[in-house]
Image (cartoon, grey):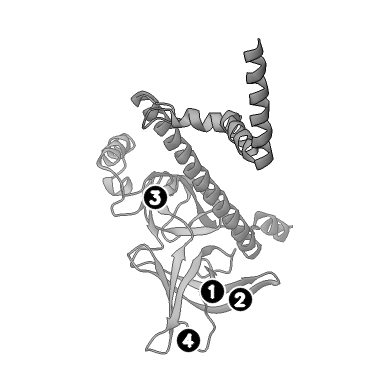
Amino acid sequence: MWFGTCTMLLLMATVWVANTVGYLTSVRMALQNVMSPARLAVAAIGSLPAGSSATAEPDFTDSEVVELQNALLENELQRRQLLIENARLHNELRSTKRMAAIEAVSSQDLVDFVAVKAKILSHAGLSDSLREAFIDAGKAQGLQRSQLVVSGAGLVLDKGTDQGIAAGQKVAHGTAVVGRISKVSQWVGLVQPITAEDFSAAVQIVKLAPQGASYGAKGLLEGTGTGGCRVTAIPYTESVAVGDEVFSADIDGVQGPRLYYGRVVHAEFSAGGEWDVRVEPAFQADTLQEVAVVQQRLNTARTGVARQ
């Protein structure tokens, strides 16, 4: 017992001396650092095997990687489809606004003209199968071959002389001129498009503005044979600019409704002192399904009044 008491007294004296000289403070801090949670965590991480991590990324199988890639690809395709649809709607809105302005110039009141609707049977002339079918059907009615078929390139309509269709009549889609009837038989008509090399028509330049339409120079629209048109016979003293619209000056020499041909996409002076004007047509022939043949007729209301 005496030995234990002496040992306790010696230990207390040692602690007192260590605290006096500052040794006890450093020992206490060392013990706290070793036992703190942060130090324990660092020590635990340090004890992990080489190449391992406390936050290691999960392993994916090949099928899961492929599934994720397919999902990303589908999202990208949907994003692109939305962009395309947005561009299409924007273009439709712009076209609608433009056509509204065009219709303000193009009179919809066909006083002396009527439009006979016709479906397009072919975009590339009369096929052999239709030609033979017409010939067989016409034999029973005593019709000659020349009365039944038409030859040449262009749109073939399901209307002919039996519906009052005649060569030279304008063919339109809405207010836009598609071409004119070049040949006609009993049941069908052949359309020469405005882009054909030997097509020509009297036209007038029109400038559309918020304040209204401004009518400009008159000229002759001709097909180029390459999908476009040009306007000739406009002197350099007249004003023409890209973006101007081109309308009919008359219909077969008669003042009638303003039919639309297209927009000026190129305009500059040529060496001959005239404008070199190029026009983009207002339609795409290969997308048309139905058109209207513009026919001149007497206004029966007026002729009826005259007889009274």
Q: Which residue is mark 1?
A: 204
Q: Which residue is mark 4?
A: 235
Instruction: Please tell me whether residue 267 is drawn above or below residue 224 in the rendered image.
Output: below
Position of the C terminus, as image quadrant, is bottom right
All told, the count of numbered labels is: 4
Displayed quadrant of residue 99: bottom right
Q: Secondary structure at mark 3?
A: helix
Q: Earlier in the sequence, mark 2 or mark 4?
A: 2
Q: Earlier in the sequence, mark 4 or mark 1?
A: 1
| Distance from Cα at disc 2 to Cα at disc 4 | 15 Å
Q: Which residue is mark 2?
A: 215
CB-based contact (under 8 Å), mark 3 and mark 1: no
**Residue 143 location, x and y as percent?**
31, 42
Q: Secondary structure at mark 2?
A: strand
For the residue pair 122 and 11, the one nearer the viewer reads as: 11
Q: Which amino acid does the dot numbered 3 rest on?
A: Asp
Q: Which amino acid does the dot numbered 1 rest on?
A: Gln
**Residue 15 location, x and y as percent?**
66, 30
| Distance from Cα at disc 3 to Cα at disc 2 | 31 Å
Q: Earlier in the sequence, mark 3 or mark 4?
A: 4
